[in-house]
Amino acid sequence: MFPVHRFRRLRKSETIRRMVRETSLSPDCFIYPLFVTYGKGVKKEIPSMPGCYQESADVLISHAKEVHSLGIPAILLFGIPETKDELGTSGYDEKGVVQDAVKAVKDAVPELYVITDVCLCEYTNHGHCGVIEKGDVNNDKTLGLLALEAVSHAKAGADMVAPSDMMDGRVAVIRNALDREGYNTIPIMSYAAKYASAFYGPFRDAAESTPRFGDRRTYQMDPANKREAIKEVALDIEEGADIIIVKPALAYLDIIALVRSTFVLPVAAYNVSGEYSMVKAAGRLGWLDEQRTMMEMLLSIKRAGADLIITYFAKEAAKILNG
Ligand code: PBG
């Protein structure tokens, strides 16, 4: 009781604060998302995500080298294909944008861990994450296509696949397909608790994947639900997921903490595009200190229980952490 206990004693200098600090960030926990597009020599900044680009594979290689040199262990690749159709066929084309980029990056920077996004929304002309039937995504008809996509990524040399579509049963189908094709050592990082969120807005500009009609609420989770996250994660683990993603991160820190305390697998949190853009915008207006806000956000995600953080801030934060 006061005055015997004075908490300010352990806050007196940076040295003692450093000694009693409970949570720390390291570039080791970052995964950096990259957007690969077709063509050569392309580097197009995404207007709603300053500092992020759509890049062709040749440009992406030098970017991947930079990421590696900053001590960030992994990238997460998204594709913007030249052509889109009803069934998203460019997503599982062995010569697709992601497949080519994976080969190029693994050739140039073999130590950089390459994770691929497995989803159809970037490749379908309607922008939904699967096959459309009667105005909605047909779950079971989508599964086989996701499996083809995952296998094509593994064939190209991907180190890990990350299905983000939120179809029921896709982890099992992808696990099966990978094993059948000889890729039983390729892990699956599944977007297990992925919410239907407004925070994905800027990403849909980046990936050109805004749905042409309707929204994703028939497959992504209702932001009001917490217990349901446990069911989603439990099922993905049962089906063979190796790492679990909670997404978005900041408005869902309670979900990250819950998943962390309920399960033993590594937990990744996706610090999504909207969370990035808000800080960038406020920073530009002079309303927030961009760097301090960024570091505090990332720390909060770690403190909530995430082992890994997928973040567009990875390079900037790594530069600060590396001193
Ligand atoms: C594709 C996908 C999305 C994101 C990652 N994978 C968009 C969506 O579901 O609409 C969002 C990433 C971000 O906002 O940074 N299904």
Image: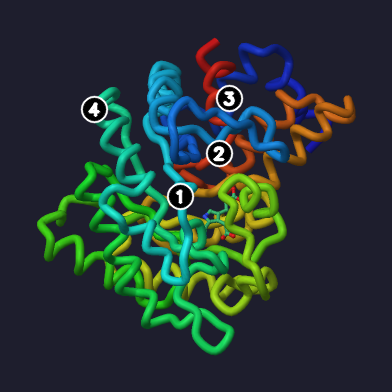
Mark 4 residue CB less than 8 A from any atom of ligand 1: no
Q: Amino acid at mark 3?
A: Ala
Residue 25: x and y, percent? 53, 29
Please identify the quadrant where the C terminus is shown. Answer: top right
Mark 1 or 4 closer to N-term? 1
Q: Which residue is mark 1?
A: 81
Q: Secondary structure at mark 3?
A: helix
The label shown at residue 311 is: 2
Q: Amino acid at mark 1?
A: Pro
Q: Residue at x 45, y 76 (%)?
A: 131
Observer-nearest residue: 230 or 31?
A: 31
Q: Mark 1 near mark 2, Cβ–Cβ under 8 Å?
A: no
Q: Amino acid at mark 4?
A: Asp
Q: Decide if residue 238 is on the left or right side of residue 34.
A: left
Q: Mark 2 near mark 3, Cβ–Cβ under 8 Å?
A: yes
Q: Which residue is mark 4?
A: 107
Mark 2 or 4 closer to N-term? 4
Asked if one can make out residue 210 in the rendered structure from this viewpoint, the answer is: yes
Give the distance between the C-alpha atoms of the residues marked 1 and 3, in whole angstroms. Answer: 30 Å
